Image: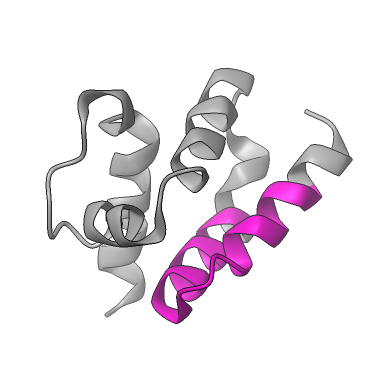
Amino acid sequence: MSDERLKRLIYRSSYTGTKELDLVLGAFARAHLAELGAAQLDRYEALLGAENPDLYAWVFSREEPPAEHDTDVLRMIHGYARTSRG
Protein backbone atom coordinates (compact mmCIF):
# COMPACT_ATOMS: atom_id res chain seq x y z
CA MET A 1 0.00 0.00 0.00
CA SER A 2 1.30 3.44 -0.81
CA ASP A 3 1.71 6.09 1.85
CA GLU A 4 -0.28 8.42 -0.37
CA ARG A 5 -3.28 6.09 -0.45
CA LEU A 6 -3.12 5.56 3.31
CA LYS A 7 -2.97 9.31 3.97
CA ARG A 8 -5.86 9.94 1.57
CA LEU A 9 -8.04 7.28 3.23
CA ILE A 10 -7.24 8.57 6.71
CA TYR A 11 -8.13 12.09 5.62
CA ARG A 12 -11.41 10.97 4.01
CA SER A 13 -12.22 8.97 7.15
CA SER A 14 -11.73 12.01 9.35
CA TYR A 15 -13.77 14.39 7.20
CA THR A 16 -16.89 12.52 6.12
CA GLY A 17 -19.20 15.43 6.91
CA THR A 18 -20.80 13.75 9.91
CA LYS A 19 -19.12 14.38 13.27
CA GLU A 20 -19.85 10.93 14.73
CA LEU A 21 -18.55 9.16 11.62
CA ASP A 22 -15.48 11.42 11.59
CA LEU A 23 -14.64 10.41 15.15
CA VAL A 24 -15.11 6.67 14.71
CA LEU A 25 -13.81 6.25 11.17
CA GLY A 26 -10.92 8.66 11.65
CA ALA A 27 -9.73 6.85 14.76
CA PHE A 28 -10.30 3.44 13.14
CA ALA A 29 -8.35 4.49 10.05
CA ARG A 30 -5.39 5.78 12.06
CA ALA A 31 -5.35 2.63 14.20
CA HIS A 32 -5.97 -0.09 11.60
CA LEU A 33 -5.67 0.86 7.93
CA ALA A 34 -1.94 0.17 7.77
CA GLU A 35 -2.70 -3.44 8.82
CA LEU A 36 -5.25 -4.10 6.06
CA GLY A 37 -4.50 -5.86 2.80
CA ALA A 38 -5.16 -4.34 -0.61
CA ALA A 39 -8.56 -6.02 -1.04
CA GLN A 40 -9.65 -4.89 2.42
CA LEU A 41 -8.58 -1.34 1.63
CA ASP A 42 -10.65 -1.53 -1.54
CA ARG A 43 -13.68 -2.58 0.53
CA TYR A 44 -12.99 0.21 3.04
CA GLU A 45 -12.73 2.77 0.27
CA ALA A 46 -16.02 1.51 -1.18
CA LEU A 47 -17.66 2.07 2.22
CA LEU A 48 -16.38 5.64 2.28
CA GLY A 49 -18.03 6.15 -1.10
CA ALA A 50 -21.47 5.43 0.30
CA GLU A 51 -23.90 8.20 1.18
CA ASN A 52 -23.38 9.52 4.73
CA PRO A 53 -26.84 8.60 6.06
CA ASP A 54 -26.38 5.03 4.84
CA LEU A 55 -22.82 4.77 6.12
CA TYR A 56 -23.88 6.12 9.51
CA ALA A 57 -26.70 3.58 9.73
CA TRP A 58 -24.37 0.70 8.84
CA VAL A 59 -21.48 1.73 11.10
CA PHE A 60 -23.74 2.23 14.11
CA SER A 61 -25.83 -0.89 13.33
CA ARG A 62 -29.05 1.02 12.79
CA GLU A 63 -29.66 -0.74 9.47
CA GLU A 64 -28.37 -3.82 7.72
CA PRO A 65 -25.93 -2.95 4.96
CA PRO A 66 -26.45 -4.23 1.43
CA ALA A 67 -24.50 -7.38 0.58
CA GLU A 68 -21.69 -5.51 -1.19
CA HIS A 69 -20.91 -3.58 2.01
CA ASP A 70 -21.55 -6.39 4.52
CA THR A 71 -17.87 -7.28 4.75
CA ASP A 72 -15.11 -8.16 7.15
CA VAL A 73 -14.05 -4.52 7.12
CA LEU A 74 -17.45 -3.28 8.27
CA ARG A 75 -17.42 -5.91 11.03
CA MET A 76 -13.98 -4.63 12.10
CA ILE A 77 -15.41 -1.11 12.26
CA HIS A 78 -18.38 -2.37 14.32
CA GLY A 79 -16.02 -3.98 16.80
CA TYR A 80 -13.88 -0.88 16.98
CA ALA A 81 -16.91 1.37 17.50
CA ARG A 82 -18.23 -0.83 20.32
CA THR A 83 -14.94 -0.95 22.19
CA SER A 84 -14.06 2.70 21.67
CA ARG A 85 -17.37 3.92 23.10
CA GLY A 86 -16.61 2.30 26.41
The C terminus - image quarter: bottom left
Residue 9 belongs to magenta span: yes
Along the line of sight, which residue is nearer the eye, 76 or 51? 51
Magenta stretch secondary structure, dominant: helix
User: What residue do we see at 42% from left, 45% from top?
Assistant: 50
The N terminus - image quarter: top right
Q: Residue 23's x, y, as percent?
A: 49, 75
Q: Residue furthest top?
A: 39
Please state if 46 lies on the left or on the right of 29 as rendered: left
- Image height of 2 relative to 79, above or below: above
User: What residue do we see at 62% from left, 69% from top?
Assistant: 15
Please state if 31 lies on the left or on the right of 59 as rendered: right
The magenta segment is 7-29
User: What residue do we see at 28% from left, 41% from top?
Assistant: 75
Q: Residue 5's x, y, as percent?
A: 79, 39
Count of marks, rendered view: 0
Q: Residue 46's x, y, as percent?
A: 49, 34
User: What residue do we see at 12% from left, 52% from top?
Assistant: 63
- Image height of 49 relative to 62, above or below: above
